[in-house]
Image (cartoon, helix red, strand yellow):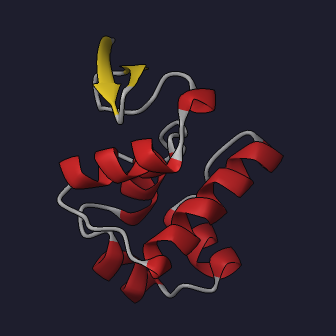
Amino acid sequence: MTTQTLAGVPVERDAEGFLTDPSLWSEAVAVAIAAEEGITLTERHWEVVRFMRHAYETTGAGPNVRLLAKASGVSVRELYALFPRGPAKTAAKIAGIPKPHGCI
């Protein structure tokens, strides 16, 4: 684990860059993580990120791609266009939640 400062907030991240404490997340932190991933967040990105956080807060886990597409109303094709390196994994990282089960 490493400690980094994102948007003026010191946060610990695991070896893959996921926050170890989701409570330290903010929209400013999300923008900083997205920039690291080469993503400029649009409103559509925010819809997915907010959905990921809500799913994590209610179930304790982030959804996989299939469930994300089904429950969020964003097609798998669009998810991959928004998050080309892997929608569930990248959206979870930006949302400040742990990597969803089944993500490589």
- Give whichever of 74, 94 is nearer the camera: 94
- Give whichever of 83, 63 is nearer the camera: 83
- Picture coordinates of residue 95, whole percent (x, y): 51, 49
- Picture coordinates of residue 66, whole percent (x, y): 56, 72
- Picture coordinates of residue 21, whole percent (x, y): 56, 23
Q: Residue furthest front?
A: 8
Tell me if 49 is positioned left or right of 59 in this view. Answer: left
Where residue 83 sits, quadrant-wise, is bottom left
Where residue 73 sits, quadrant-wise, is bottom right
Residue at point 52% right, 36% down?
Answer: 98
Residue at point 55% right, 40% down?
Answer: 97
Residue at point 42% right, 41% down?
Answer: 29
Tell me if 83 is positioned left or right of 98 in this view. Answer: left
- Give whichever of 40, 56 is nearer the camera: 40
Above or below residue 23? Residue 37 is below
Locate the C terminus and report the quarter of the image it occupies: top left
